[in-house]
Image (cartoon, helix red, strand yellow):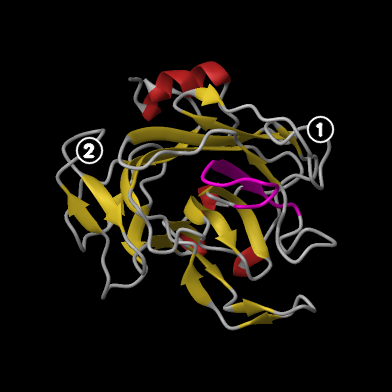
Amino acid sequence: MTIPEEFPDLISFWDFSEPTGKERVARGAHPYRLRDSDPKKPVARVEEGIFGSHSARILPGSAFHIPRAECPALNLHGAKAQVSLVAWIKREPSPNAWSCQAVAGMWNEHSKRQYCLFLNLQIWDSKEQVGAHISAVGGATPGYKYCMDAAIGATPVPLGKWQCVAITYDGKYARAFINGKLDSRGGDGGSGSGGRNPYRYDGGIFDGGPDGADFTVGAVLRPAKVDDDHREHGSVLANNYHGLLGGLAVYRRALTDEEIRKLAG
C-alpha cells in the first residue's frame, strides 16, 4: 500500500498513533493538531491499525476538531478549489442507524458548509454508501431544506471490515470511491446534472470567511432542529461516525483514479 506522503499536494495525514486524550498530530506539510471536541468524552486509541498498531475509535459524543484559525491550509474554497479526502475506516454498528455519518471535512450545517466525506447520507435513494458533500453556497441547496449536492456511490460500506473510502472534487465533478475504485452510479443527478457518481457540480467550494466551519473528524455541528420554514434552532454535535479510523489524508487537489487505487492498496 502506498503511503499518503508519496503523492504531491498532501496537506495533512493523521495515523492516530497517539494515546487517548492526546492531540493527534499530522504528518505532511502541515502538522495540524486534532483535539478532542469534548475532553470529557475523548476519542480512544485502540490496538488495531493500518499505518501502525493503533487507530482511533470514535463513538457517539466523541469527535476531533481543529479551530478554523489554526488550520488555514485546510480552508479550501473558491471557484477553482479542489480537494481529496482519503480515510481508512472500520465501521461498527451505530445506535442511530438512520443517521448520516460525517467522517471528516470543513462542514458546519449552520450555513457554513464547504466539503466533507460522509457515509449513509440517505438522500437521492441512497443508504450506507460513501458521499462526497460539496457546497458552493454554505447553506441548504436552493429550494431544499438541506444540502442535496453530493456524489454518492452505489455500494454499501460494510461493517466490521477495514475499508479505504475517499472523495475528490476537481472544480467540476465530485467523486466517491471505495477500496480504490470509483463507485459509479447513474440515475437522477439531483440538483446538478448527469449521474450521481461522478456528480457534476460547477459551483466551487464556499468561502466561509473567518467565522466559517472548523475542520472536524467524526462529527459535525448542525442545528438541533430545522422547521418547515427552513429556520434553524439550536446547535448540536451530530452526524457521528461510529467505528475505527486508522488513517486520514487531505490533499489540496483531486487525486487521480490511479492514485486513489494505490492508496487503497
Q: Look at discs 1 and 2 and give the one toward the viewer.
A: 1
Indicate the amino acid at tag 1. Gly
Residue 190 appears at what percent x and percent y? 79, 45
In the image, residue 128 lies in the stretch drawn in magenta? yes
Q: How many marks?
A: 2
Residue 244 appears at what percent x and percent y? 30, 47
The residue located at (64%, 54%) in the rendering is 114
Of 155 and 149, the residue lying toward us: 155
Of 86 and 199, the residue lying toward us: 199
The disc label shown at residue 143, or none: none
The disc label shown at residue 194, or none: 1
In the image, residue 255 lies in the stretch drawn in magenta? no
Q: Quadrant of residue 240?
A: bottom left
Q: Taken as a whole, is the magenta stretch helix, strand or loop?
A: loop
Q: Is residue 257 above or below residue 42?
A: above
The disc label shown at residue 49, or none: 2
Disc 1, SS: loop
Answer few, some or many: residues within 10 Å of disc 2's Cα (few below 14, many 20 plus, some between 14 and 19). many
Name which of mark 1 and mark 2 comes first in the sequence. Answer: 2
User: Gap between marks 1 and 2, in whole Å?
Assistant: 38 Å
The residue located at (71%, 63%) in the rendering is 146
Q: Is residue 264 above or below residue 67?
A: above
Q: Which quarter of the figure is the N terminus placed in?
A: top left
Of 261 and 5, the residue lying toward us: 261
Q: Is residue 41 left or right of residue 31?
A: left
Indicate the amino acid at tag 2. Gly
The residue located at (16%, 55%) in the rendering is 19
Q: Is residue 175 left or right of residue 240?
A: right
Residue 17 appears at what percent x and percent y? 21, 45
Image: magenta residue range: 122-136
Q: Which quarter of the figure is the C terminus placed in?
A: top left
